[in-house]
Image (cartoon, helix red, strand yellow):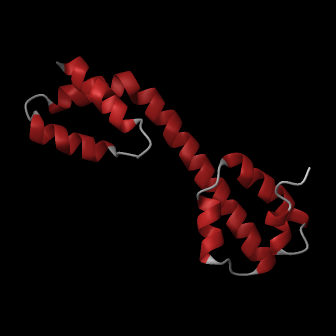
Amino acid sequence: MIEDVVAILSYVALGPVAVSDEIVHDALCRLQPSRAEEIMASFGQAYGQAYFERGLAEGEARGEANALMRLLEKRFGPLPSRLRERIVGADAASIEDWFDRAISAPDLQSVFEAEGRG
């Protein structure tokens, strides 16, 4: 039984939509109040490393996005909200490319215009 619940939780938690540990814990407390802690412990042991690595990668990407936005604002002034959203939603490779170009770009448009050029 616990293995089945852990497998289901793993599928949900590692899927495309982030699910916090608190939400999982609350659901378990409602569904299996007497075994919620035991299931969470099994779940944490089985998938703790994957959560840790995912959280680390997300934190790193968020930090890089924040650093890029700070650099752009220091160089070119306030950023449009659409650009902020684009940066926050970008993959790490794009953020790194934009950051490198932002160091010497003559204007904001040049940072993002260079995409696709080889």
Seen from this angle, which residue lies furthest left?
Answer: 34
Left or right: residue 56 versus residue 116 is left
Which residue: 86% across, 75% down? 107
Which residue: 19% across, 45% down? 26
Left or right: residue 46 versus residue 89 is left
- The image quadrant of residue 80 is bottom right
x, y percent for residue 52: 48, 35
Which residue: 75% across, 70% down? 72
- The image quadrant of residue 104 is bottom right
Front-most of residues 69 and 80: 80
- The image quadrant of residue 56 is top right
For the N terminus, the image quarter is top left
- In the image, residue 49 sits, relative to residue 18, either above or below, namely above
Seen from this angle, which residue lies furthest bottom?
Answer: 77
Front-most of residues 91 and 75: 91
Left or right: residue 25 versus residue 33 is right
Figure disc tally? 0
x, y percent for residue 35: 12, 28
- In the image, residue 101 sits, relative to residue 96, either above or below, namely below
Front-most of residues 56 and 115: 115
x, y percent for residue 34: 7, 30
Seen from this angle, which residue lies furthest front?
Answer: 116
x, y percent for residue 28: 17, 37
Which residue: 84% across, 56% down? 100
Left or right: residue 109 versus residue 31 is right
